[in-house]
Image: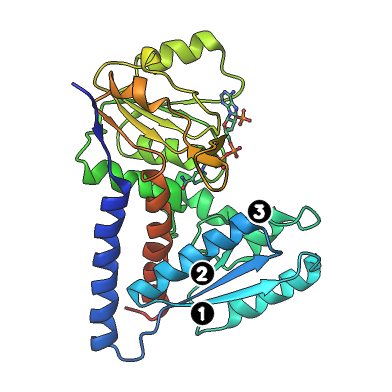
Amino acid sequence: MPAEKIDGKFISTDLRSKIKDEIATLKKTHPSFSPKIVIIQVGDRPDSSTYVRMKLKSCAEVGIDGELLKYPADISQTEMMQKLDALNKDVSVHGVLVQLPLPSHLDEEAVTNAVNVEKDVDGFSELNIAAVFKKNSKLKIVPCTPKGIMYMLDYEKIPLEGKNAVVCGRSDIVGGPMSKLLEKRGATVTTLHSKTTPEQFKFFLKNADIIVSAVGKVNFIHGEDVKPGCVIVDVGTNYVADETKKSGQRMVGDVDYESCAQVASKVTPVPGGVGPMTVVMVLDNLLQTAKEQSHL
Ligand code: NAP
């Protein structure tokens, strides 16, 4: 039987409407409650502009006030830090998101760390990432992609405790926290990366009940590599040539969907899987930070 598609678009729409309802209720009960996000875009990269537009539109749809601060590509590190400092101090702003990637002269690490942890709705600052790894951390902002995947797995009622999970990729913002979140929920997790041998890949993938692939390589996971009945989450965002598209390219994940769908029980598609969950988690994190800062 072919695998069931995990519909990230549907799950994210459902969560978005819950966020919208909660904001509407809070605005009624607490008239001064006015959640606000500021998005910083440096330069004019078309992909960044698209992501920023999508995020601002999503914010507006649920009742979050969104402001875009667009700076020239040659903004200095000092100026960036000053802008962030001002936003960190502005009590009307509950969330600050710096659209990545930044031009190469800027220190991305320093910039993401300069966002106040309590306003860091992406969850990319060192402290928020470290908090994922701590057992009882008071900091609660989880990076959006792993948070969205956990929400999706729970929505689909996929058991985690006692299961073998494999996460391909160990980046600070996706693979690393993903492995830890699965482990915190009782899965036994193996993290695979570029130094993993082909033999290890073969062994661990074949024994995994849950696979999350966050590598960024087309056709990275095939049906023949995975265990019958497993659940596959495809985080990868890759582009391949496609003459039928106006842009001349098409977005694909890491997973060969057709072959994996013959073996797995559930698979997330690309597009329409993890992507929409990542966007809705920005809203979820913003609602959380706005409530905390408004003492609600
Ligand atoms: P990243 O920082 O480049 O990390 C990629 C990870 O994959 C690294 O840990 C790397 O291992 C590992 N890797 C690379 N080549 C490999 C190989 N041949 N075999 C095994 N492991 C390999 O990327 P990221 O930010 O984590 O993102 C991963 C992918 O997810 C990208 O395609 C990105 O565009 C996508 N993404 C999608 C969303 C979404 O919302 N859908 C959100 C975020 C990211 P080493 O650590 O050993 O180098």
Side of 93 relative to 43 (left or right): left
Q: Position of residue 125 (x, y in %)?
A: 58, 57
For the N terminus, the quadrant is: top left
Q: Name the quadrant where ligand 1 sits.
A: top right
Q: Position of residue 130 (x, y in %)?
A: 53, 49
Q: Nearer the viewer, mark 3 or mark 1?
A: 3
**Residue at 39 percent of width and 84 percent of height:** 34
The 10 Å Cα crowd at callout 1, few under 14, some 14 to 19, many 20 or more, is many
Verify CB contact (< 8 Å) between mark 1 and mark 2: yes
Above or below: residue 58 compared with residue 46: below
State the CA–CA distance, disc 2 to disc 3.
19 Å
Q: Amino acid at mark 2?
A: Lys
Q: Secondary structure at mark 3?
A: loop
The 10 Å Cα crowd at callout 2, few under 14, some 14 to 19, many 20 or more, is many
Side of 243 relative to 261 (left or right): right
For the C terminus, the quadrant is: bottom left
Which callout, 1 or 2, points at the residue further toward the start of the chain? 1
Above or below: residue 282 compared with residue 214: below
Q: Amino acid at mark 3?
A: Pro
Q: Which mark is residue 119?
A: 2
Image quadrant assignment for residue 63: bottom left
Mark 3 Cβ and ligand 1 under 8 Å apart: no
Which callout, 3 or 1, points at the residue further toward the start of the chain? 1
Q: Position of residue 152 (x, y in %)?
A: 29, 45
Q: Amino acid at mark 1?
A: Val
Q: Which mark is residue 93?
A: 1
**Residue at 37 percent of width and 12 percent of height:** 224
